[in-house]
Image (cartoon, rainbow, N blue to C red):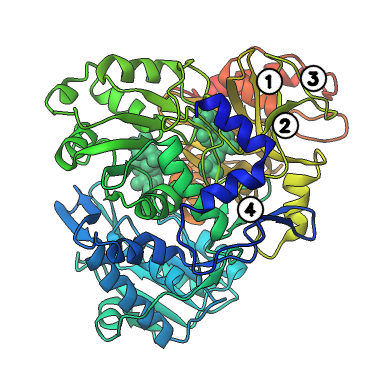
């Protein structure tokens, strides 16, 4: 089938289409109900099927005779380690860890938090939970204790799995004190913390709830996989929303593994036994779908990379890994390519490696700018494919489906709708817009399998955030347009979510933190354009009357506050003191206007603005603090 045929089939007859795809998965009990609806009239896939994601990722391949094939390649330039694990080796460790977790009282229906750096044990922990039907919630290692505590309070883990440290370029980050602090901050107190001692010299303060990871694994028997229902939550993954509270995206099991198998074969075009590398982090959705479950379910060796595209040790790392491990398909964020391009503009490092193993380069996580795409194409002769998706979808929604048909690439577009996604562009009143008209990117229900099931214990927010804006459609939060040939162009978020170096962050959350500074009367945080990271947060602050404070002092304190509460990953470095914020006559802060002024892009003066004179004031303030020169 070509792209048009497969796409049309998936939209016209979703039940038959996904029933067929579900047959690519081994079920303990095959579903007889393919598509049903929950209490919100929202789709449920394969409701009565039974399966286990860990079984599909590991045990099945061993039973099929591939136990000695490589499942996982750990490449860590920061510790100068390369270690390979076969499917049998992964199984042995995962099945024992699962046994250990069971001995701590964990059972189907419980939750855990996993707070680990990019090491194989992060994947083992996820798989061990999946093995016994425990819902895991991985928290990105770059988040500070305050963020971890919010997630602990929301998903109430019985156990937290962590490691002694992560490494940021040359900086050792001790995780245990962060976990202890988060537990202190949280109202919910987990029963145990399972800690892997990496023996890299980080301090591991002892607490009564601590359990040593190695002792737990080696003291346990291997246990089998527990069958779970298709709609059983495999994981909860928190992502930024438009308020200070992150949203717990709930992922089912049956729909998800079906969608991942479909993605590996039909979108990424990867055959079993090839080496697949997604250079992301297990703390993000890419890490769940395409470092852990997707490649393993498709019997691909997955690479766990502990490093950065540059500085570990230099901009050659990506090419060294591709060539050394014979990576056939790679996935990274455009920001990583921009970082490499900055260090190695002529691609001198690229020429030093044999990259003939590489078939395709996928890019996602943020808009892929044309200059980055062109630079890649100039230096590496493989298709560079932008594709669009979200934590919520769990797998690509717009892409060039490389396993089906390689369509011509249009720079600036993420491609066409992936099979299963009926993507439309709607105007403010819900009317469908024509070619090249920019509007809201929405998806007509039912969403295909594998997409979000709900928000963890917050069905009201789920409905109001995604389903209520346009009845019968899922609202993505992104703006964009389609051209005459149905290529889709994503123009950016239409809400207060920003994208910093491929990391999704909430400006509303940053505003709450900035506003908590004792000298701040009110503030607005917006995402300003940045050549490397795509966007970076910029805080506009009004100081309380009667307080005199030097700009550099306030900036330093606000930056520290955000680092302390969210983590360094927020990358807030610039604070601009203003006399007042631009507002509408009803008192709403005009953030979009602030962004345009900061980016020096053209804008129309909003008709609702309270006082037009403020625009000049803000421009002067920005220049005074030299924003953009840092
Ligand atoms: N633990 C602790 N701190 C972390 C961290 C982690 N896991 N990840 C990032 N940080 C810290 C960094 O050390 C840095 O701290 P600093 O301000 O003290 O220097 C800060 O958070 C910002 O990190 P980062 O956004 O990674 O910026 P960078 O300047 O170190 O590197 C890039 C820039 C572009 C190389 C890097 O952002 C990158 O590789 N991006 C790709 C992202 C990606 O793959 N995203 C997944 C989406 S698919
Ligand atoms: P996350 O949930 O962290 O994966 O972030 C999802 C958001 O990142 C989307 O809603 C988009 O705003 C943005 N995004 C992801 N991929 C792309 C892409 N290929 N092009 C444009 N924006 C993207």
* Mark found first going from the N terminus, 1 or 2: 2
Quadrant containing ligand 1: top left
Q: Which mark is residue 516?
A: 4
* Mark found first going from the N terminus, 3 or 2: 2
Which image quarter is the C terminus in?
top left
Which is in the foreground here, disc 1 or disc 3? Answer: 3
* Label 2: how many Cα within 10 Å (few below 14, some 14–19, many 20+): some
Task: Give how far apart the Cα atoms at labels 1 and 3 are.
Answer: 16 Å
* Mark found first going from the N terminus, 4 or 3: 4
Task: Give how far apart the Cα atoms at labels 3 and 2 are.
Answer: 17 Å
* Mark found first going from the N terminus, 1 or 3: 3
x and y, in percent, of residue 450 in the image: 57, 51
Q: From where the camera sits, is residue 527 visible?
A: no
Q: Determine the secondary structure under disc 3.
A: loop
Task: Give how far apart the Cα atoms at labels 1 and 2 are.
Answer: 9 Å
Q: Which mark is residue 580?
A: 2
Which one is nearer the viewer's eye here, 175 or 102?
A: 102
Residue drawn 59% across the image and 31% down it? 7
């Amino acid at each position: 089938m070509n792209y048009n045929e497969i796409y049309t089939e998936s939209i016209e007859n979703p039940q038959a289409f996904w029933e067929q795809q579900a047959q690519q998965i081994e079920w303990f009990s095959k579903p007889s109900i393919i598509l049903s609806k929950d209490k919100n009239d929202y789709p449920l896939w394969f409701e009565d099927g039974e399966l286990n994601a860990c079984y599909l990722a590991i045990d099945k391949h061993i039973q099929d005779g591939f136990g000695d094939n490589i499942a996982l390649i750990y490449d860590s330039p920061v510790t100068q380690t390369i270690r390979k694990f076969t499917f049998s080796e992964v199984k042995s460790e995962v099945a024992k860890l699962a046994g250990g977790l069971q001995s701590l009282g964990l059972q189907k229906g419980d939750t855990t938090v996993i707070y680990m750096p990019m090491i194989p044990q992060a994947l083992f922990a996820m798989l061990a939970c999946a093995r016994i039907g425990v819902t895991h919630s991985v928290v990105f290692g770059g988040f500070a204790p305050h963020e971890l505590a919010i997630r602990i309070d929301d998903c109430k883990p019985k156990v937290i799995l962590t490691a002694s440290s992560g490494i940021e370029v040359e900086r050792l980050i001790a995780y245990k004190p962060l976990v202890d602090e988060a537990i202190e901050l949280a109202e919910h107190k987990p029963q145990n913390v399972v800690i892997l001692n990496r023996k890299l010299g980080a301090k591991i303060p002892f607490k009564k709830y601590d359990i040593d990871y190695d002792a737990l694994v080696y003291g346990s028997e291997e246990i089998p996989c527990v069958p779970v229902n298709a709609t059983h939550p495999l994981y909860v993954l928190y992502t930024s929303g438009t308020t200070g509270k992150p949203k717990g995206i709930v992922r089912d099991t049956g729909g998800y593994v079906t969608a991942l198998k479909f993605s590996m074969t039909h979108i990424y075009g990867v055959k079993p036994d090839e080496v697949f590398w997604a250079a992301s982090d297990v703390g993000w959705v890419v890490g769940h779908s395409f470092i852990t479950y997707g490649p393993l379910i498709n019997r691909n060796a997955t690479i766990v990379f502990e490093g950065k595209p540059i500085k570990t040790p230099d901009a050659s790392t990506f090419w060294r890994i591709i060539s050394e491990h014979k990576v056939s398909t790679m996935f990274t964020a455009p920001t990583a390519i921009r970082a490499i391009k900055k260090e190695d503009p002529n691609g001198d490092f690229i020429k030093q490696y044999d990259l003939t193993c590489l078939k395709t380069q996928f890019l996602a996580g943020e808009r892929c700018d044309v200059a980055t795409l062109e630079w890649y194409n100039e230096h590496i002769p493989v298709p560079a494919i932008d594709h669009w998706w979200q934590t919520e979808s769990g797998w690509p929604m717009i892409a060039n489906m490389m396993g089906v048909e390689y369509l011509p690439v249009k720079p600036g577009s993420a491609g066409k709708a992936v099979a299963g996604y009926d993507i439309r562009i709607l105007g403010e009143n819900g009317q469908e817009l024509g070619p090249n008209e920019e509007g809201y990117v929405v998806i007509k229900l039912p969403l295909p399998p594998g997409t979000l099931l709900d928000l963890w214990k917050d069905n009201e927010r789920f409905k109001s955030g995604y389903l209520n804006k346009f009845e019968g459609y899922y609202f993505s939060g992104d703006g964009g347009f389609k051209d005459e040939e149905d290529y889709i162009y994503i123009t950016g978020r239409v809400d207060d979510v920003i994208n910093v170096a491929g990391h999704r962050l909430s400006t509303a959350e940053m505003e709450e933190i900035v506003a908590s500074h004792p000298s701040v009367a009110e503030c607005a945080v917006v995402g300003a354009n940045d050549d490397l990271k795509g966007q970076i947060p910029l805080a506009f602050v009004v100081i309380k009357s009667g307080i005199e404070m030097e700009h550099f002092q306030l900036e330093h304190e606000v930056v520290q506050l955000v680092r302390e509460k969210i983590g360094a990953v927020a990358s807030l470095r610039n604070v601009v003191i203003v006399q007042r914020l631009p507002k509408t006559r009803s008192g709403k802060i005009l953030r979009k206007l602030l962004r345009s002024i900061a980016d020096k892009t053209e804008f129309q003066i909003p008709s609702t603005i309270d006082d037009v004179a403020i625009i000049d004031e803000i421009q002067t303030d920005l220049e005074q603090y030299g924003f953009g020169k840092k």
